[in-house]
Image (cartoon, rainbow, N blue to C red):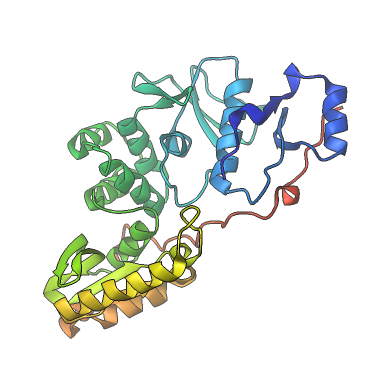
Amino acid sequence: MNHDDRDLLIARHHDRAVLRRAAAAREIERVRRGAYRRPAAGPVDPRAAARDHLVAVHRQLDAEHVFSHESAALVWGVPLWEAPTATHVLQRSGGSSRSARDIVRRRGLPERRVERDGLPVTDLARTVVDCLTTMHPLGALVVADWAMGRGLDREEVAGMLAERRRGVRSARVVLGLAEEHVDPPWETWLRYVALRAGLPRPRTQFRVDSHAGRFFVDLAWPEHRVLAEFDGRIKYRDGAFGPGYDAERALFDEKVREDAITECLGVRPLRFVARDARDPGGVARRLLARFPPDVRRAARPHPLLPPPPGPPRAEGGSSGSRRQFELPS
């Protein structure tokens, strides 16, 4: 759930006594040192909290700055696998021993920058390069998949990587695996698990023309008659996509769709859900079991794709459960 940025309060612009009274009444909560906001009415998505933090940093910094890495990806709208735990910013001078621990500062203002929602960020290609060279490969693949779906030039990014020194080997592998027709982050996660297990590269959003209509399967190895899909269970909740959304109808439509795919191709898709992220090894074993013996024997864990991190943090509890702020004396 996103807050309205106008709810953000920077302490130096407000009366300290008023803020103390609001804090005592739990009418506001801390975002970071010197920045507070009115609590959300319901659960707070970690990505929304990370964006609050970024906006607070932006309003507090007097020096010229540009947000980068996963912080820039957050502003671009990437559905990151994990919300950033710190805000990444580029400035003319780097951080010092007295720098705030919740900000990662790097030296140098980039030429490749844009403004999004009033926030200065690295352009999309530079953002992807930064993420590819610093993030866990799964998180980086989520960023790259999302960007590919929005017209990212793979060759341009490859050229920029050639100018880097650190993290390039893994970055090139991840860039080569990025796909345009994917819905991150969960479809990316499922594909990552399959690729890490050493399975052949799947086809994404595989088209199936059946008697019931045209459908698309998340991952397909048609030559081996293997299909796999991520099942977002939220679509089976009434109102999940707005008032009037009928979960029972969605469940019926999904059954018709799956039966039509199975009848057309002679194979039923393997289905995975979010809780499967707790056991990626089990997911890999289920996938491998569908392949012929020669593929299973040849499969080896990809040396540059480490085990995926656990499932991303779910939305938090009520806003009152978040850490309350303490005003400095």
Viewer-side residue, 298 vs 40: 40
x and y percentages locating residue 66 in the rendered image:
47, 23
- In the image, what residue occupies the spot 27% across and 36% down? 161
Q: Where 324 sits versus 110, above or below?
A: below
Which residue sits furthest left?
223
Which residue sits furthest front?
244
Which residue sits furthest top?
63
Is residue 99 visible in the rendered structure shown here? no
x and y percentages locating residue 43 in the rendered image:
64, 51
x and y percentages locating residue 11 in the rendered image:
75, 23
Viewer-side residue, 28 vs 177: 28
Is residue 118 visible in the rendered structure shown here? yes
Considering the image in quadrants, where does the N terminus appear? top right
Question: Total number of numbered labels?
Answer: 0
Q: Where 163 sits versus 92, above or below?
A: below
Examine the image and state in which quarter residue 20 appears.
top right
Examine the image and state in which quarter residue 116 appears.
top left
Q: Is residue 316 left or right of residue 228?
A: right
x and y percentages locating residue 56 in the rendered image:
62, 28
Considering the image in quadrants, where does the C terminus appear? top right
Viewer-side residue, 306 vs 253: 253
Examine the image and state in which quarter residue 262 appears.
bottom left
- In the image, what residue occupies the spot 40% across and 74% down? 281
Viewer-side residue, 16 vs 134: 16
